[in-house]
Image (cartoon, rainbow, N blue to C red):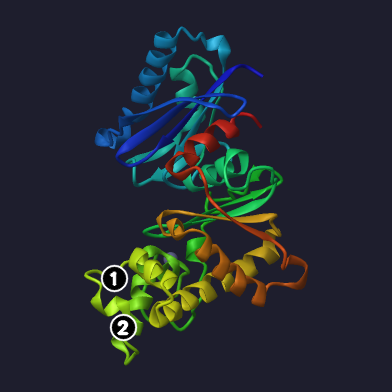
Amino acid sequence: MKKYGFGVDIGGTTCKIGLFETTGQLVEKWEIPTNTQDAGKNILPDVAASLNGKMQERGISRDEIEGIGIGIPGPVQADGSVAVCVNLGWKNVDVPKEMGALMEGILVKAGNDANVAALGEMWQGGGKGCKSLIMVTLGTGVGGGIIVDEKIVAGTHGAGGEIGHIVVNPHEKIACNCGRKGCLEQYCSATGIVRIAKEFLAEGHEASLLDKAEEVSAKTVFDTYKENDALAVKIVEKFAYILGHALSNFACVTDPEVFVIGGGVSKAGEPLIEIVNKYYKKDAFSSCTDIKFALASLGNDAGMYGCVRLILE
Ligand SMILES: [Zn+2]
């Protein structure tokens, strides 16, 4: 194993880049802007220039680089190629081949950003020491990544792990961003939690701290939940029931060692994990009741970590 690897998490506005030791130690991280003009044709050359510049600055030769892992904000095939990535303006980009040519033959691998984040959490984060996990990212939407035996389950179309779009309510009338109705994301994302909260607030209810809140957000809901506010408890219990129930179904598919919960909503911390776990246990298949719950611990760096882990396979 060579000493260093690069993890490059390409987002729609910035690329987060990390120089790592292949032991898992982050040496340095920085960001460059993502130039999505001209169908995103400059993105990989910009990243290559930045990596070459860093190697020069630190006097690191290409013989010391094990490889470069790249996270993409869209579906990625198992071979690292991208058919369409709306966020970057890409069509038919063979990331390992194009980036490999730009970096004169250094090994390049690519994966979907949510999937590599799950791999990063397995390697150095909330799932450290585990070989199989399901990561759930509760942010503006609900993302996810599934790792089985230390490998990302990317699937045939790169849509493996899109757990936010499992339908949990077939009676839903409002469409999700994806076009389906009743997706997990419609209830358990930050926006979904606000939606549940507003439904409860619109009904007759006991006096609640949320009545006085300037803005009802997932954070205010969890903050008032921690104060034992009766209405916030009802809102969080509905959220936890929906998420816990969905996870009990996921467990029947890959039977992970741990569920790692990340994203902005997970800042609510242990109380969130505890209540989701409580509802999970109620519905879990008997062999899967003891699956652990953990908070993601790498934050926005998880993708970079996972990108590096990708090249160590
Ligand atoms: Zn959906």
Residue on which the image places disc 1: 216
Q: Nearer the viewer, residue 60 or 275?
A: 275
Mark identifier at residue 245:
none
Q: Amino acid at mark 2?
A: Leu
Residue at left 36%, top 59%? 140
Number of marks in picture: 2
Q: Nearer the viewer, residue 65 or 238?
A: 238
Q: State which quadrant residue 287 falls in.
A: bottom right
Residue 305 is situated, as x and y percent measured from the top left of the image, at 52, 35
- In-image side of 264 versus 69 (left or right): left
Residue reaching furthest to the front: 227
Residue 288 vertical position relative to residue 63 in the rendered view, above or below: below
Residue 259 is situated, as x and y percent measured from the top left of the image, at 61, 57
Mark identifier at residue 201:
2
Residue 4 is situated, as x and y percent measured from the top left of the image, at 56, 19
Residue 101 vertical position relative to residue 203 in the rendered view, above or below: above
Residue 41 is situated, as x and y percent measured from the top left of the image, at 32, 30
How far is the residue under mark 1 from the one under mark 2? 10 Å
- Whichever of callouts 1 and 2 sits on the residue coming sooner in the sequence is 2
Which quadrant does ligand 1 occupy?
bottom left
Residue reaching furthest to the bottom: 204
Residue at left 24%, top 35%? 37
- In-image side of 296 versus 174 (left or right): right
Packing grade of label 2 (10 A; few <14, some 14-19, many >=20) is some
Q: Quadrant of the N terminus?
A: top right
Packing grade of label 1 (10 A; few <14, some 14-19, many >=20) is some
Q: Amino acid at mark 1?
A: Val
Q: Nearer the viewer, residue 207 or 195?
A: 207
Task: Report if the CB atoms under discs 1 and 2 are less than 8 Å apart.
Answer: yes
Q: Secondary structure at mark 1?
A: loop
Q: Nearer the viewer, residue 225 or 110?
A: 225
Q: Secondary structure at mark 2?
A: helix
